[in-house]
Amino acid sequence: MNKEDMILISVDDHIVEPPDMFKNHLPRKYLDEAPRLVHNPDGSDTWQFRDVVIPNVALNAVAGRPKEEYGLEPQGLDEIRPGCWQVDERVKDMNAGGILGSMCFPSFPGFAGRLFATEDQEFSLALVQAYNDWHVEEWCGAYPARFIPMTLPVIWDPVACAAEIRRNAARGVHSLTFTENPAAMGYPSFHDFEHWKPMWEALVDTETVLNVHIGSSGRLAITAPDAPMDVMITLQPMNIVQAAADLLWSRPIKEYPSLKIALSEGGTGWIPYFLERVDRTYEMHSTWTGQDFGGKLPSEVFREHFLTCFIADPVGVTTRHQIGVDNICWEADYPHSDSMWPGAPEQLDEVLTANNVPDDEIDKMTYQNAMRWYHWDPFSHIPKDQATVGALRKAAEGHDVSIKALSKHDHGGGSDWQAQMSKVTVNTTGKQGK
């Protein structure tokens, strides 16, 4: 397949939320208490909510910037591409990158919305619903052919969470962002079936996918206090391996045959060995651990329930049939530091060509699986011949994608990265972090 003819839907991108996001959606009585974006004397912008301060971290918004500007220092909105936080500019960036569709994870509330967990549950629910309404109505609603809507959970209350899942599914939302490890945040684990049962039932009833994103619990994989930053970055996908094991061996997988779970930003190269290992574990230990998959192997059950995603991942593409081609989606990770934007089609094409991937499998991994799993049809809004890499890039002619140094801050600090992370990840009773 010529790369110009590919259709790309990314199931993992990110939003840097705009400062006015609550204005049209939070009840007036709560507006003065809502999180607010504050411009600081050093030029940075930080979200502040009560005693919690959340910076815009440079690594989370480096699209279009030189690698010399990667780091952990806080940034101002004027130091990042407008496409990070302005929806019109985001679509221009998507066009320039040849990307038709995008599913955007939150930033400052945390991937599971734990920032909004307060002692006032009515206020907390209002914050979650306001965020979800902004995301669905303003961000996704501005360009329904370009964004897969995703909503935050009510993580502190499974009954209220179920109601919010159903409320959003009624308007076409079939994607819920969630933590990869609720126990690390002080909530019951995935193995507490009765606690989370209302949520599982709502997910199944509405055919909504539970998306567990790496790092969403705020629990980083760190080998030693003096380990360099590179160790943590290398080990980040290990969080998703742990989540895959937790969920595969959990009761909901056995109780709900149609339950769908996405392992977001976790890559795919590790999966063939993982599947070998779970099958071996089942063979050797199920007689005394009591695990029962109804006559199936764990690897078979994994393929029935789990969606995985990759950016380039040559190993994962090579072993795609061991993973399951119907279980793989592509991601761009815009505007994070792993993103291939705006050269995603070229880098992806290089991997696909090297592995002689046939056109039908390319179509599945680049857009068809995403459409099927998330019940999302962009072609009801845009003709298919206008959705290709070539067509979108033609529409973006003249849009500036040159690399630009935008930061006004110092960079580096790799030797003291954990001290910097302590400023980024604020711990408030286990409910706040990345």
Image (cartoon, rainbow, N blue to C red):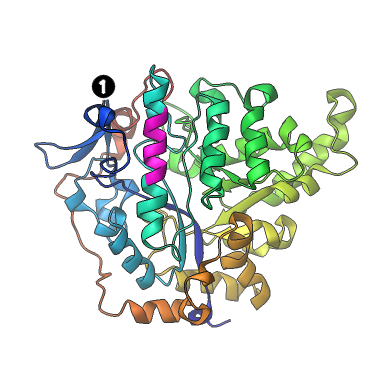
Whether residue 86 is visible to the viewer of this picture, yes or no, is yes
- Left or right: 310, with 335 as reference point: right
Q: Position of residue 428 (x, y in %)?
A: 37, 20
The answer to which image quadrant residue 122 occupies is: top left
> Which residue position is annotated with label 1?
51
Q: Position of residue 274 (x, y in %)?
A: 70, 44
Q: Establish if 53 lies above or below 90.
A: above
Q: Nearer the viewer, residue 13 or 374?
A: 374
- Left or right: 410, with 352 as reference point: left
Q: Quadrant of the N terminus?
A: bottom right
Q: Secondary structure at mark 1?
A: loop
Residue type, label 1 = Asp
Q: Establish if 11 lies above or below 196.
A: below
Residue 333 located within the stretch drawn in magenta: no
Instruction: Say few, some or many: other residues with alpha carbon within 10 Å of mark 1 (under 14 / 14 to 19 / 20 or more).
Output: few
- Left or right: 58, with 428 as reference point: left
Q: Position of residue 306 (x, y in %)?
A: 67, 48
Q: Establish if 224 lies above or below 261.
A: above
Name the residue rendered at 52%, 70% in the picture: 380
Judged by its main secondary structure, the magenta piece is helix
Tell me the magenta residue range: 125-133
Q: Establish if 198 lies above or below 398.
A: above
Name the residue rendered at 67%, 35% in the picture: 201
The answer to which image quadrant residue 422 occupies is: top left
Whether residue 358 is visible to the viewer of this picture, yes or no, is no
Name the residue rendered at 50%, 78% in the picture: 383
